[in-house]
Amino acid sequence: MGRAGATPGAGLPAGPPVCKGPDMILLRHGQSEFNLHFSATKRDPGIADPKLTELGHAQAEDAARRLAGEPIARIVVSPYTRALQTAEPVARALGVPVVVNPIVRERGAFACDIGTPRSALAEAWPGHDFSTLDEIWWPVVPEPAASVIDRAALFRAEMAALPDWENTLVVTHWGFIMSMTGLSIQNGEQIRVDPTAPPPAEIPWRV
């Protein structure tokens, strides 16, 4: 999503600490074409389901190197192209299965949150299973904040029910990460979360 948290750059020195621990990892997708333009103008450039920029691809490759030593058994990824492209080098490096899950998609608010129909995704990404998605899987009207928070709560419960939830990497978006943690992170950044812990008391929705 194209908010202030989408400033280009692979690092955020003042951001949340990334410490080792038995936690699920949330990875924000690399810089997208939308992020690039929105960061410069603070205006919606009207790019639907944007792809990664050159910097975004570099951030994805960097994430693959950074996560190489993690005990990751599965990658859960949003169906947006920017997330699928970010997950690709990570999955290739780790050799683990990718599960496409629309629950971890971005909050629908900008042009970038208009997705690609399921049939077109299946053609573009033949190695992934999109059979659980509706043809139009993204919200067609602006999504209330409460809806994203509810999705995060559902995902918390689903992950907490897994015996090995700590071996999961989630390639997702600014808004979903905000709902899960109450924190804003930059493109290509990662943060750890315990799905069995209480959700954040407050979601600021701004940085």
Image (spheres, helix red, strand yellow):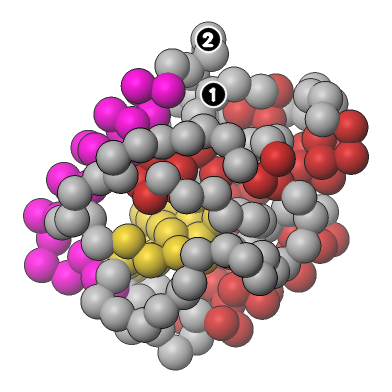
Q: Can residue 119 be seen from the camera position used here?
A: no
Does the magenta segment cover residue 102?
no
Q: Which mark is residue 108?
A: 1
Q: Secondary structure at mark 1?
A: loop
Q: What's under tag 2, amino acid-wise?
A: Val
Contact (Cβ within 8 Å) of mark 1 with mark 2: yes
Report x, y in % for residue 143.
Answer: 47, 17
Horizontal placement of 147 versus 119: left or right?
left
Q: Which mark is residue 65?
A: none
In this view, the residue in front, 9 or 117, is: 9
- Count residues near mark 2 (Cα–Cα under 10 Å), then give few for <14, some for 14-19, many for 20+: few
Query: Which corner quadrant holds the C terminus?
Result: top right
Report x, y in % for residue 45.
Answer: 84, 26
What residue is shown at x 82% (from left), y 25% (from top)? 43
What residue is shown at x 66% (from left), y 70% (from top)? 13
Gap in Å between the C-alphas at discs 1 and 2? 7 Å
Q: Secondary structure at mark 2?
A: loop
Report x, y in % for residue 4.
Answer: 70, 40
Residue that carries the numbered disc 2 in the rendered image: 141
Horizontal placement of 134 versus 61: left or right?
left
Does the magenta segment cover residue 160?
yes
Report x, y in % for residue 106.
Answer: 51, 35
Main secondary structure type of the part rendered in magenta = helix
Q: Which residues are magenta?
A: 145-167
Query: Which corner quadrant holds the N terminus?
Result: top right
Place residue 134 in its image quadrant: top left
Up-down: is 127 above or below 142? below
Label 1 or label 2, whichever comes before in sequence order: 1
What is the count of numbered marks? 2
What residue is shown at x 54% (from left), y 49% (from top)? 184
What residue is shown at x 30% (from left), y 44% (from top)? 200
